[in-house]
Image: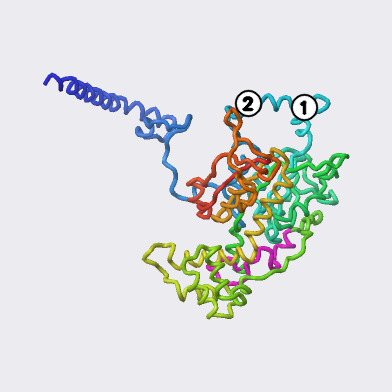
Amino acid sequence: MKYMRPYITTAFNSAAIISCGNIGVQAFQPSITTSLHATNLQFTSTQLFSSKSKRKGEITTKKSSNPADIQQEFASSYHAPVMHQECIDALLKRSHNESKKRNKYKKLAQEAKTSKDGIKAQDIDEKRPRIFIDGTLGGGGHSSCLLQNLDADDVLIGCDVDPSALATASTRLKEYIVESDKSNSNSDENPVFIPVQSNFRDLEANVKDLKHPRTGENLFYPNANEEFVGVDGILLDLGISSHQIDNADRGFAFMKDGPLDMRMYGGDFENKAKEFDSDNGDFQFVENKKDGLGGMTAADICNEFTEEEIARILKVYGDEPRARKIAQAIVESRPLATTGDLKEAVSRVTPEFAKKGRRMGRTATLARVFQALRIVVNEEDVVLKDALEDMAPSLLKKGGRLVVLAYHSMEDRAAKRIMRDGSVDGSRGSGGIQRDIFGNEVFETEGKNAKPFKPLGKKQKAREDEIEMNPRARSAVLRVAERL
């Protein structure tokens, strides 16, 4: 019994404390309630005594479960940008910075890096306007957010191969566009937006001759000695916009019947020219200088390719387990002209609901089939490889940021490899991780193992509240790298 005495004493003391606490709350409850009502604050006693969360300054509250109550900034009827704040913070170097421990051994070398006149190179660089590129403009959501965070005379080049997207975004960002005749020029206090019609892999050819709309100086060769000046950041929001999916005339989705097209740049759409009209003149975007705006459609693949090739496309680009059966059904259903024809062919060999889960059901299968055809029609794998291996390293200046937002495993894998190994397919070779005497990773800038980028931080996923409002953000993966 003597061994149990300490535990019994502790139990009695705890019970006494709890009892006194309850008495205290009940005793002061009326005065507290009266005081709160006197100031028109509708708190309950439970909320009053709620504990603070682990984050400093935050109070634990239950989030609204209604998506309509969650306001997503910079969204439009054309497209809702995903992880817009995370992307802008990465571009402007507000996030993904190296730790102080890793930086302390580089501080002396950075301070010693000065120009011939004894002025720091960083100070010289700050005198010129910053240049950013939104390689996948879409509805202009990310660009709108970035422009609100830039200084006067800073330049954002917005690129999209889709004339409909370019027209919509340019109209939305009209206040940042300096027109050629200066009759409706934007405020001198605003940054500058330059729309460019181009596939993002062709950006180097399409932007190298651009001039600053206000100063007239060449953006990339401002000096007399013709030294190339790169951009400060490139954003690539891969995938497809909500408007393109929802527009039946584009043929990207199976929910509505439309032509089996799927070309990002195909068609002549209503807002291509009309939305450029303004009261004080028309502004024009920079047109694509590359040829090849034709190209095959998804109907061409379904009607002309062999059964074996269609099956390979569905397997490689859609990870489709029924690739062979679906390819056979497509061939037997020829000719296919609309998305409804393709949907009917796939439905012939796919149950509406499957015992093995939703992934094997009809809706998920159709999504994979349409995705695979879209990737091949637009050569998205080749385009992305060219953009990551050639365009981005060529245009980014040293220390510039590459921000990639991917929605498909193929896209994310390519972004991960280019940032880590220097190539999408690993052809340059990683050569292993080399470290200096302080344990910092050393990146080669010359030789066969040279890497153009240094990955910063880990991949990021969209927050739950954003996914609740925009379900298409669920598959988004954000990766950030710095140009070496």
Which residue lies at the image location 71% right of the left edge and 67% below the top edge? 268
Q: Which residue is mark 2?
A: 105
Which residue is nearer to you in this view: 440 or 200?
A: 440
Query: Label 1 neighbourhood size at 10 Å, few (<14), some (14-19), many (20+)?
Result: some
Residue 295 at x, y percent in the picture: 69, 69
Query: Label 2 neighbourhood size at 10 Å, few (<14), some (14-19), many (20+)?
Result: few
Name the side, left or right, on which 459 lies relative to 190: left
Examine the structure image and report whether residue 77 is included in the region drawn in magenta.
Answer: no
Which residue is nearer to you in this view: 151 or 315?
A: 315
Q: Which residue is mark 1?
A: 114
Which mark is first along the chain, 1 or 2?
A: 2
Look at the numbered disc 1 and give the secondary structure of its residue.
loop
Quarter of image, res 300: bottom right
Residue 5 at x, y percent in the picture: 15, 20
The colour style of the image is: rainbow
Is residue 72 among what the camera can see? yes
Q: Tell me the magenta residue range.
A: 251-275
Is residue 190 among what the camera can see? no
Which residue lies at the image location 49% right of the left edge and 72% below the top edge? 324
Q: Are marks 2 and 1 in contact (CB under 8 Å)?
A: no
Amino acid at the residue labelled 1: Thr
Examine the structure image and report whether residue 274 is included in the region drawn in magenta.
Answer: yes
